[in-house]
Amino acid sequence: MKSEISRFLLFLFILSIFASLLSSFRSQDKIYAFADGGLASITENNSKASFILSSIKDYFEFLSSLISFSAETATGESIYSHIGMRLIPTVHLAIFSIIFGAGSGVFFSLYSLYRKSERIKDVFARISEVILSTPVFVFSILLLILFFYQLDLFPPGGYEFLNSYYVVLPGLALGMRVFARVYLFQVREVWSESKSSYTLLLLTRGYPWKHIVFKEIFRKVFPLTLIIIMLDFSSLVSGAMIVEEIFFFPGIGKSLFYSIKAMDTKLLATLLLYIGIVFYTMNRIATHWQSVLLGENKHES
């Protein structure tokens, strides 16, 4: 437990430095952009100032503002309040996308094995490859045309508190890629596991094929699939800029896009810090769950 806390604190320290450093580069862009626009001028002293010293100063100011809860966006809004307001829509969208994408990917991989159909397996594999090779904004636009302009079933964007009606279209756009990644990984694993000595032993003992596929094989393969699902979830909780911008969804991704576009350095640094913490936490949780589930499977075997 102590080693895990120490590892996290070290990671947090290094991450905060990188987040502040990257935002410092963006602040330099802002200075030059203002200078080019005639809004400001770069003095001789500024041009000769040490970037390292200014970065150190920016880092401690950034760290101090976070600890004292005084960090503000360029518009004067509290950064914690800004992120907090966008966290619930983002998590809502991420959960919907994972349930749809991971659930369908796991089910169809097992279903193809249950039916012992190479055709079903290959058809969904080709669909998954097309999904992964196509930019996500293409599917977003197609979903808008079909479900909003043609069928008028779902709103084109926006969000209402905990109303899943508003996360269907962006959730489908993001969930399709989750489906493709999960399916391609799991279908390979479940078909490989179906030829293992353990599966053959269950067959010789008279276990129903449905039980073997949807319970035994699923339980042996899922710990590996869990890593992909958790990483996809951490990516979605960190925000999806393109999809959120298309559906004008008020999430973390749209906020990150705004911070880059508006050159809001403190908001950008805080969001980068948040994204790093989410990825680290989800990865550690997934690794722990995987070891627990694999241990249980090994014990039962």
Image (spheres, grey):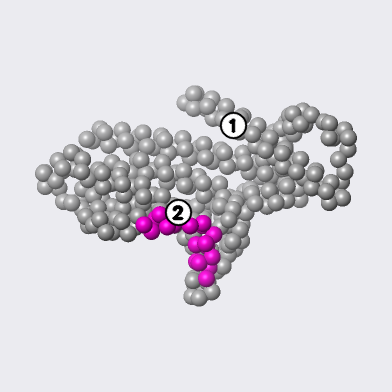
**Residue shown at 27%/37% (left/top)?**
297
Q: How many marks?
A: 2
Residue 118 location, quadrant: bottom left
Amino acid carrying label 2: it is Leu
Residue 165 falls left or right of residue 100: right
Q: Residues within 10 Å of mark 2 (few under 14, many from 20)?
A: some
**Residue shown at 54%/30% (left/top)?**
8
The reply to whether residue 258 is in sight is yes
The reply to whether residue 57 is in sight is no
Mark 1 or mark 2: which is in front? 2
Residue 195 location, quadrant: top left
**Residue shown at 62%/41% (left/top)?**
272
**Quadrant placement of the C terminus:** top left
Residue 28 falls left or right of residue 103: right
197 or 130, nearer to the observer: 130
Secondary element at image label 2: helix
Would you say the magenta stretch is mainly helix, strand or loop?
helix
> Which stretch is magenta?
126-145
* Residue labelled with disc 2: 132
* Residue labelled with disc 1: 12
Residue 52 falls left or right of residue 281: right
Q: Position of residue 234 (x, y in %)?
A: 50, 45
Residue 138 magenta: yes
9 or 18, nearer to the observer: 18
184 up-or-down from 166: above or below: above
53 up-or-down from 221: above or below: above
Amino acid carrying label 1: it is Leu
Q: Position of residue 246 (x, y in %)?
A: 59, 61
6 or 147, nearer to the observer: 147
